[in-house]
Amino acid sequence: MISVASSIGYCASLDEVQNQIIQTNKKLAETKQREKSVMGTLVKTQQELEQIDHNLANLNSKIGNTEQQISVITSQVNQAESELNTVQVQLNGKKDILNKRLRTLYMHGYQSWLEYLFNVKDFSAFITRFETVSRFAKIDINMIQGLQDQQRLIMEKRQEIVQKQQELTSQKTLFVQLKDQNAQALGSKLAVTQKKQKELEIIQGSRSQLEKALDEQEQTSKEIEAEIRQYQEKNQTTLGTGKYIWPVKGEIVQGFGWRMHPILRKREFHTGLDIAVEYGRPIMAADSGIVIFAGYNGGYGKMLLIDHGSGFSTLYGHTSVLLVNKGQTVVKGQIVAKVGTTGLSTGPHLHFEIRKNGTPVNPNNYL
């Protein structure tokens, strides 16, 4: 027969490990929260990077189109300059012709066209000279006026083209500035991404180690259950009545069964009832029995385990104060602890379990 003392000794040997386990669970919860935060930042940063890439592609396209337009406009400006030069050459040529005529008149002793026109002996000669002067004057005037009109149109066209060229150049400058700004933003976001990815790798490595520790805790829990079953199978002492009372009266905020853990954020089987009451509320033994564990036990925090015989035991977790010791006999209704929030707990409440041969069963079927 295994004695109560031997069972207690086994539980006592786990105290140091269980104190480490509760810290591991807390660190795991914190690590998962950090991982979630970093991943959220990475997702947001990736979305921003995609938007910046889109902006850069759009700006590159606009810069390319603008450069093509500037190239076309520059060709048009050069063409206008060439046309202006041609017209100017023609005007200069016409002026040279007029100057030559004036020099010819001067060389023949005439000071002006009027002197040439009226310096005749008869009216017939006057008419002849008049027609000649008129014909040359008309040709010269039409040619000069045409060239001047052409010059004016080309200059107006050139002015419009130059203005368009300036607008396009300003537009290109703006696009280049925006591109530089986006490139800087891209570099900044990439740096953030690299930093967060490294941080995520470290966090995930830490999480992996913590989850391994948690697996070891679960294995330890199974070993405890096996030890309890072994003890209960060999110790036929029955102190309990088989009828259980509520250890505290309060609101059941979490029932027996599958749930999403409020801290670890993973799906797990909830092995008891969570009863929400104020901090420090006295906790009663649900039935008579022997205390086989009183101390820290991983996520349970400060915990009591009472054996009632016939394979049944009750567990009281997250307590603030333990009022009984391992090996002590208690009676139904005796105050054995006070409500707290130790271990993996989000607030003051009692985690209450009923176990049969070490395996949790639904307390609602026995209370």
Image (cartoon, rainbow, N blue to C red):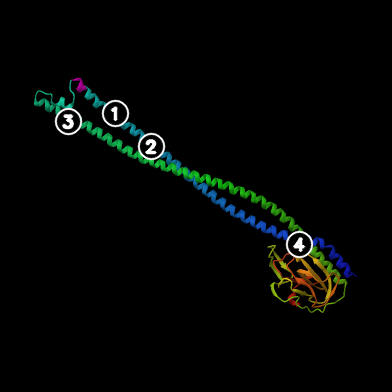
Question: Residue 80 in the image: x percent, y percent?
Answer: 35, 36
Taking the image as shown, residue 356 lies to the left or right of residue 103, namely: right
Residue under label 1:
92
Overall secondary structure of the magenta stretch?
helix
Is 106 inside the magenta-drawn segment?
Answer: yes
Q: In which quadrant is the C terminus drawn?
A: bottom right
Q: Which residues are magenta?
A: 104-108
What's the residue type where badge 3 is placed? Ser
Q: Is residue 70 above or below residue 205?
A: above
Q: Secondary structure at mark 2?
A: helix
Q: Secondary structure at mark 3?
A: helix
State which quadrant residue 102 falls in: top left
Q: Secondary structure at mark 4?
A: helix
Q: Is residue 309 visible?
A: no
Residue under label 3:
134
Pointer 3 or 1: first along the chain: 1
Is 337 inside the magenta-drawn segment?
Answer: no
Circle 4 packing at 10 Å, graded few (<14), some (14-19), many (20+), is many
Residue under label 4:
22
The residues bearing labels 2 and 1 have C-alpha atoms spaced at a distance of 22 Å
